[in-house]
Amino acid sequence: MTDMLSPAAYVERQRPGQPKMKAAIFVEKNRIVLDEKPIPDVGPLDALIRITTTTICGTDVHILKGEYPVATGLTIGHEPVGIIEKLGSAVEGFSEGQRVIAGAITPSGYSNACLCGQCSQDGPRTKHGFKAMGGWRFGNTIDGAQAEYLVVPDAMTNLSPVPEALSDEQVLMCPDIMSTGFAGAESGKVKIGDTVAVFAQGPIGLCATAGAKLMGATRIIAVDRVAARLEMSRAMGADLVVDFSKVDPVDEILRLTDGRGVDVAIEALGRQETFEAALRVLRPGGTLSSLGVYSSDLRIPLDAFAAGLGDNAIVTSLCPGGKERMRRLMDVVASGRVDARALVTHRFKLDEIEAAYDLFANQRDGVLKVAITP
């Protein structure tokens, strides 16, 4: 509990006496704290789920550091696994007590963005139109999953039952990390026989490596400097690894491809240097698929961009959401084609989430992903 009057206390003033839950709350830059909030009510189309497992994402660290703005008092987190506690009056096809996940992206299913096939961009209308990334609501525009309970909006669009044979940790990567990593390969339109370079082998990069393998790439080059991550990348589908602390990754990838370059380069870190390197290793007409969350302006070097005449494509992806996306990802897990359990390297109780943030944000002790259980 905080010594100061917390954001949750302001909420409690307006809703005295309501049952409370623990939640990880954004207070200010460099302060996400565990505090109490009222357990939320559900609207007709909502579901209240009791969280059984969640995790911390790199985007949450951007929020913690003040690099991505959210409202004071917001509950953080967007990767929920849980059990339905209460259903809205209009929700059909689900039952209380059912085990479910929901994607980090929770589209309504009926907005203009959804009907145009861009569910991740579903969001509230502003005077300038719909907000980009509006489909990302948990821990962004509404309370998120690092809590004992979570309200899932548009439940019939976003809840997906978890097969009984799969554990929480087997499906924990589906709401965001696996969906995002796979989206990098999908948006890059990886084809059978392609050569693909994946820059950075954190959780998203590792899933991008796995996604490229599933899409048919026959030579996947993983780039990182952490030996354990490069080793894990081989288990996820990499054929070759490049340690950028020992060699120049651009020179090495061009050497490995006999100067041809790669068909698709996936950037999974969100840094100028990795973005630029990914651009420089493309073959003419190749695609740079960008997954990074950038906290400063990007520069496109004139020579790497071939003055705009290289027929290259630069695409970005926000992971698709909705129950069908989640079903497909869980089917991939159930098939045994991808096993992401090794990405969970540390486990904490919700009561320990401030320590979990400290570990994860500072990337100590070989951490990849943490599992948080209430």
Image (cartoon, rainbow, N blue to C red):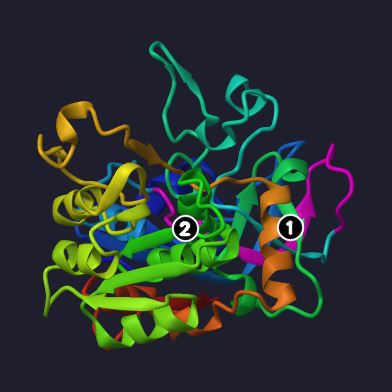
- As drawn, the residue found furthest toward the top would be 127
Residue that carries the numbered disc 1 in the rendered image: 327
Q: How many residues crowd mark 1 within 10 Å: few (<14), some (14–19), many (20+)?
A: some
Reply yes or no: does residue 92 show up in magenta. yes
- Identify whether 106 is placed above or below 247: above
Q: Distance between the residues labelled 2 and 1?
A: 27 Å
Question: Which residues make up the magenta segment?
Answer: 74-95
Seen at 80% across and 71% down, the residue is 163
Provide the secondary structure element on which disc 1 rests: helix
Q: Which mark is residue 41?
A: none
Magenta part mainly helix, strand or loop?
Answer: loop
Q: Residue 115 occupies which quadrant of the picture?
A: top right
Provide the secondary structure element on which disc 2 rests: loop
Asked whether 338 or 57 is in front, the reply is: 338
Q: Which of marks 2 and 1 is nearer the N terminus?
A: 2
- As drawn, the residue found furthest toward the front would be 258
Seen at 22% across and 50% down, the residue is 275
* Amino acid type at image mark 1: Arg
Eye-nearest disc, 2 or 1: 2
Asked whether 278 or 129 is in front, the reply is: 278
Return the x and y of residue 229 as percentages of the image width and height.
Answer: 33, 81
Return the x and y of residue 176 as percentages of the image width and height.
Answer: 51, 58
Q: Residue 370 occupies which quadrant of the picture?
A: bottom left
Return the x and y of residue 334 as percentages of the image width and height.
Answer: 73, 74
- Identify whether 230 is placed above or below 202: below
Q: In this view, does 345 lie to the left or right of 104?
A: left
